[in-house]
Image (tube, rainbow, N blue to C red):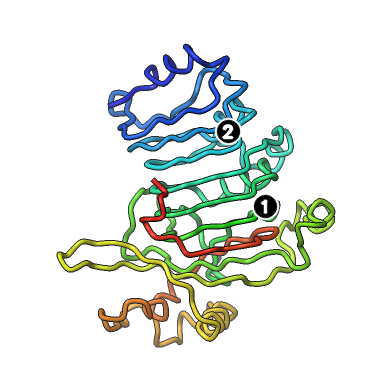
């Protein structure tokens, strides 16, 4: 069991010289109240931070403000939050740009709008890993989409897997969660001209411009030989991706008329085709400025936590 004062004592002792800090294997609590972990001491030389525990609520903008030199952040085991006004357009304009380059999120929950805040403030991010993640967001009724806008982000590598979505705030997966993810990037966005593209292509009033699909992913539940529940993520084939795209182009009418809707069932021996029966739930779309490489779809053994 760990408390806020424990972290502050560590930082107080080494804040002026600390370059790397790893806090792992702990349960964060404060008299059983849900409070966020806000770091009190400024660490001017901290470049590498790992926070991996349980029941941790981490205040992201507090962290970025305190650790201006941070290049690599790994957070697992709780909820990533911001203060209430940091995701609005006016507040984002006032935030100082941060030099974070590598981000790893695992076994945690996050609100959809925080991705836009991260993309806007940490424009130099190059590598991102998202695994065993639950995202809270609201689906558009017209196209069945939960939007995750990272149009300011130009990644060299993206590792992603076991990401699910829903409207309520929790840290675990449920039957009615959305398991389909569309990865997209802006058209004509290359790393060589990314500076010009950011300024010319992104209008604050209409931040999402023409884009094209990279991959469709599907996360679904699995059961082992001894009944252990797990999650697996696969990429849809081109034919399957075309089917999903066509469905969401006419989402409102399809949710009424389609036979592949709630109440349908499929063979438990082939859960990887379950995406056909979950189209009615909707999907999430990550929109990046550019992604150079998606090496593999993550599995829990990929070292996220």
> As displayed, is residue 291 above or below residue 278?
above
The residue at the point 69 percent across, 39 percent down is 92
Q: Position of residue 147 (x, y in %)?
A: 58, 60
Judged from the image, the secondary structure of the residue bearing numbered disc 1 is: strand
Q: Above or below — where is 62 with respect to 247?
A: above
- The crowding category of the residue bearing disc 2, from other C-alpha atoms within 10 Å (few below 14, some 14 to 19, many at least 20), is some
User: How many tags in the picture?
Assistant: 2
Residue farthest left in this picture? 226
**Dot 1 corresponds to which residue?**
153
- Residue at image coords 36%, 78%: 274
Residue 164 in view, yes or no: no
Q: Along the polypeptide, which appears first: circle 1 or circle 2?
A: 2
Q: Which of marks 1 and 2 is in front?
A: 1
Q: Quadrant of the N terminus?
A: top left
Question: Residue 210: x percent and y percent?
Answer: 74, 68
Q: Which residue is drawn at 67% across and 41% down?
A: 121
Q: Residues within 10 Å of mark 1 (few under 14, many from 20)?
A: many
Q: Do the residues labelled 1 and 2 touch (CB within 8 Å)?
A: no
In the picture, the disc for residue 178 is none
Residue 156 lies in what quarter of the image?
bottom right
Classify residue 196 as left or right of residue 206. Answer: right
> For the residue labelled by badge 2, is the local secondary structure a helix, a strand or a loop?
helix
Q: Position of residue 158 (x, y in %)?
A: 56, 57
Viewport quadrant of the C terminus: top left
Q: Position of residue 170 (x, y in %)?
A: 36, 48
Q: Which residue is drawn at 27% across and 83% down?
A: 267
User: In the rendered image, is residue 218 in sight?
Assistant: yes
Q: Give the vertical position of 129 relative to 183 (above or below).
A: above
Label 1 to label 2: alpha-carbon separation? 18 Å
Q: Mark 2 points at which residue?
A: 61
Question: 20 or 212: nearer the eye?
Answer: 20
């Amino acid at each position: 069991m760990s408390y806020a004062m424990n972290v502050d004592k560590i930082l107080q002792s080494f804040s002026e010289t600390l370059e790397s800090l790893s806090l792992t294997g702990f349960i964060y609590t404060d008299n059983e109240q849900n409070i966020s972990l806000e770091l009190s001491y400024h660490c001017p030389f901290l470049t590498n931070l790992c926070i991996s525990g349980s029941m941790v609520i981490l205040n992201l903008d507090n962290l970025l403000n305190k650790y201006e030199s941070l290049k690599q952040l790994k957070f697992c085991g709780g909820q990533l939050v911001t203060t209430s006004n940091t995701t609005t357009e006016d507040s984002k304009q006032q935030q100082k740009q941060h030099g974070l380059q590598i981000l790893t999120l695992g076994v945690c929950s996050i609100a959809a709008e925080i991705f836009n805040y991260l993309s806007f403030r940490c424009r130099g991010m190059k590598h991102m890993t998202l695994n065993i993640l639950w995202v809270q967001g609201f689906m558009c009724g017209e196209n069945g989409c939960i939007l995750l806008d990272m149009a300011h982000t130009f990644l060299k590598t993206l590792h992603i897997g076991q990401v699910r979505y829903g409207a309520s705030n929790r840290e675990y997966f449920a039957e009615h969660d959305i398991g389909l993810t569309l990865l997209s990037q802006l058209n004509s966005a290359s790393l060589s001209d990314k500076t010009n593209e950011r300024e010319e292509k992104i209008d604050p009033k209409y931040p999402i411009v023409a884009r094209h699909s990279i991959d469709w992913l599907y996360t679904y539940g699995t059961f082992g030989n001894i009944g252990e529940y797990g999650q697996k993520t696969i990429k849809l084939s081109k034919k399957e991706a075309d089917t999903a795209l066509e469905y969401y182009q006419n989402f409102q009418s399809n949710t009424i008329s389609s036979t592949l809707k709630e109440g349908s069932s499929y063979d438990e021996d082939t859960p990887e085709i379950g995406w056909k029966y979950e189209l009615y739930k909707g999907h999430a779309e990550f929109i990046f400025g550019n992604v150079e490489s998606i090496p593999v779809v993550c599995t829990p053994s990929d070292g996220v936590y």
